[in-house]
């Protein structure tokens, strides 16, 4: 599953799952635009790591919940590398609380960062992909978007929305040789999950048939598959990387 001569954008790529995805795509030969919003030093560390391994990368700051900045991110990729083959929408936040105590700001912030960002980046990316008649779009959802989770109505709505959005876009773009797929991670220890109590973590662990938490790298392997030519006949799919947590 080599990605030599491919160009990828990974949003929210400075830390956690996004970082692992950026490194894995670069390891397989892709040039990577490492998007970040606030973690500038961490993003540049990812770029330096890729370059030290002989790869090509650049860091680009953008709040992808804003359409103009998503457009700027895609333009940066085109200006630097001449094309865009792979888009990985990974950026997101959580603001967990019960609905009764959730503020409108908490709802709007998560919907904007987690769902509207996917719309923005896809809209910006599809035009050059259509011109090239090639593209791989991989959107990062969550098992919470499939099964729900108390205290995360905003996050669950955004992640479920990503799935419906992706299936619809897959139908729109299939005739242009552009695939759109979803990776839905289970419990992957990152900064986003650090807010959970030890009791909550143990409950998830007990409900996971494989009996362990996943790693960011295991999510990155799934993304790399969808980005590859080996996945050329797969579109509109949702791949759970969750140790069996929400198997159907």
Image (spheres, rainbow, N blue to C red):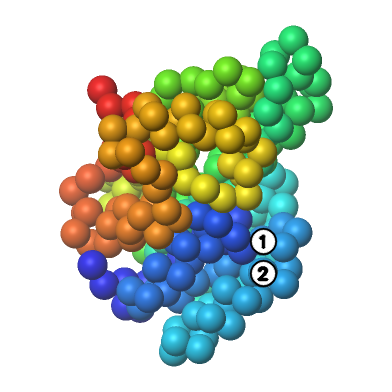
Residue that carries the numbered disc 2 in the rendered image? 42
Asked if residue 17 lies left or right of residue 185, the reply is right
Q: Is residue 218 visible?
A: yes
Q: Nearer the viewer, mark 1 or mark 2?
A: 2
Quadrant in the picture for the C terminus: top left
Disc 1 or 2, which lies upstream in sequence?
1
**Residue 47 occupies quadrant:** bottom right
Percent position (x, y) of residue 152? 61, 24
Which of the two residues, 239 or 88, is positioned nearer the viewer here?
A: 239
- Residue drawn at x 71%, y 32% is 95
Please report contact status of discs 1 and 2: CB closer than 8 Å, yes or no.
Answer: yes
- Residue drawn at x 55%, y 29% is 200
Percent position (x, y) of residue 176? 31, 50
Q: Marks 1 and 2, Cα distance to the nearest angstrom?
A: 9 Å
**Residue 180 occupies quadrant:** top left
Q: Residues within 10 Å of mark 2 (few under 14, many from 20)?
A: some
Q: Residues within 10 Å of mark 1 (few under 14, many from 20)?
A: many
Residue that carries the numbered disc 1 in the rendered image? 36
Circle 2 sits in a helix, a strand or a loop, which is it? Answer: helix
Percent position (x, y) of residue 113? 66, 41
Q: Is residue 230 above or below residue 50?
A: above
- Residue drawn at x 53%, y 81% is 49
């Amino acid at each position: 599953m080599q990605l030599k001569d491919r160009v990828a954008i990974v949003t929210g790529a400075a830390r956690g799952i996004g970082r692992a995805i950026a490194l894995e795509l670069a390891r397989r030969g892709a040039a990577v635009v490492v998007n970040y919003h606030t973690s500038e030093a961490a993003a540049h560390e990812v770029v330096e790591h890729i370059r030290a391994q002989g790869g090509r990368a650049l860091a680009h700051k953008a709040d992808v919940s804003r359409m103009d900045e998503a457009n700027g991110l895609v333009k940066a990729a085109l200006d630097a590398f001449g094309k865009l083959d792979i888009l990985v929408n990974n950026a997101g936040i959580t603001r967990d609380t019960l609905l009764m105590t959730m503020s409108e700001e908490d709802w709007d912030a998560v919907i904007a960062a987690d769902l509207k960002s996917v719309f923005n980046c896809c809209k910006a990316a599809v035009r050059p992909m259509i011109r090239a008649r090639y593209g791989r779009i991989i959107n990062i959802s969550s098992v919470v978007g499939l099964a729900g989770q108390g205290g995360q109505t905003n996050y669950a709505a955004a992640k479920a929305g990503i799935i419906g959005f992706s299936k619809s876009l897959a139908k729109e773009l299939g005739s242009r040789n552009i695939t759109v797929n979803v990776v839905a991670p289970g419990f992957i220890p990152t900064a986003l999950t650090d807010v959970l109590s030890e009791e909550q973590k143990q409950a998830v662990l007990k409900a996971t048939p494989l009996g362990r938490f996943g790693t960011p790298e295991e999510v990155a392997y799934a993304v790399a598959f969808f980005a590859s030519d080996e996945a050329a006949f797969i579109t509109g799919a949702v791949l759970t990387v969750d140790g069996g947590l929400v198997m159907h």
